[in-house]
Image (cartoon, helix red, strand yellow):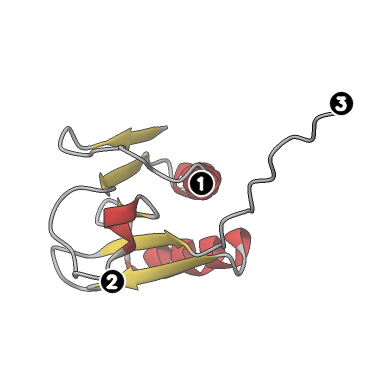
């Protein structure tokens, strides 16, 4: 199950992040755990963070059984979502350890519909 902290704001979250979250959910479920979102476009991040434009989410990892499981989830997720995403295991070994998932894909051009006269 995908769950989130009450403080998470999903304003303008890029829809592609949902695909990565579904992959993450399956990986966490393999350990019998829920996938917890701890931040979307809320909280304090670096000034250039993709969180502020709805292109990044953070996931809790401390509830996974051990460091090997955390690394396995991070590496498997990185491989599963492909090059349009960045998956980082940030602050390992600290109470703030988490996965950062960022969508880097370029926006698709919007083509206005053609009209016939």
Q: Nearer the viewer, mark 3 or mark 2?
A: 3
Q: x and y percent of residue 100 in the render? A: 35, 62
Which mark is in front, 2 or 1? 2
Say which residue appears at 50% left-offset and 65% top-offset: 104
Alpha carbon distance from label 3 to label 2: 56 Å
In the structure shown, which secondary structural element does the residue marked by tag 3 occupy?
loop
Judge left or right: residue 107 versus residue 36: right
Contact flag, marks 3 and 2 (Cβ < 8 Å): no
Farthest-out residue, top? 117
Q: Which residue is mark 3?
A: 117
List the single residue furthest toward the front. 117
Judging by the rendered image, the residue that carries numbered circle 2 is 90
The image quadrant where one finds the C terminus is: top right
Provide residue 79's location: percent of width, then percent of height: 60, 67
Q: CA distance from mark 1 to mark 3?
A: 57 Å
The answer to whether residue 60 is visible is: no
Which residue sits at x=63%, y=46%? Answer: 110
Which one is earlier in the sequence, the residue at label 1 or at label 3?
Answer: 1
Residue 106 placed where, x, y %? 57, 62
Point out residue 16 in the picture as x, y percentages from the top left corner: 53, 47
Q: CA distance from mark 2 to mark 1?
A: 21 Å
31 relative to 99 in the view: left or right? right
* Mark 2 touches mark 1? (CB < 8 Å): no
Q: Quadrant of residue 112?
A: top right
Against 24, residue 69 (above or below) is below
Residue drawn at point x = 63 percent, y = 53 percent: 108
Disc 1 designates what residue?
A: 30
């Amino acid at each position: 199950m995908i769950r989130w902290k009450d403080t998470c704001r999903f304003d303008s979250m890029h829809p592609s992040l949902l695909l990565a979250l579904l992959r993450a959910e399956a990986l966490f479920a393999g350990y019998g755990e829920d996938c917890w979102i701890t931040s979307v476009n809320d909280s304090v991040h670096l000034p250039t963070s993709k969180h502020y434009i709805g292109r990044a989410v953070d996931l809790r990892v401390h509830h996974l059984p051990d460091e090997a499981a955390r690394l396995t989830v991070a590496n498997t997720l990185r491989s599963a979502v492909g090059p349009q995403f960045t998956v980082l295991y940030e602050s390992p070994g600290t109470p703030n350890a988490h996965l950062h998932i960022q969508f880097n894909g370029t926006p698709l051009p919007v083509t206005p519909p053609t009209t016939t006269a």
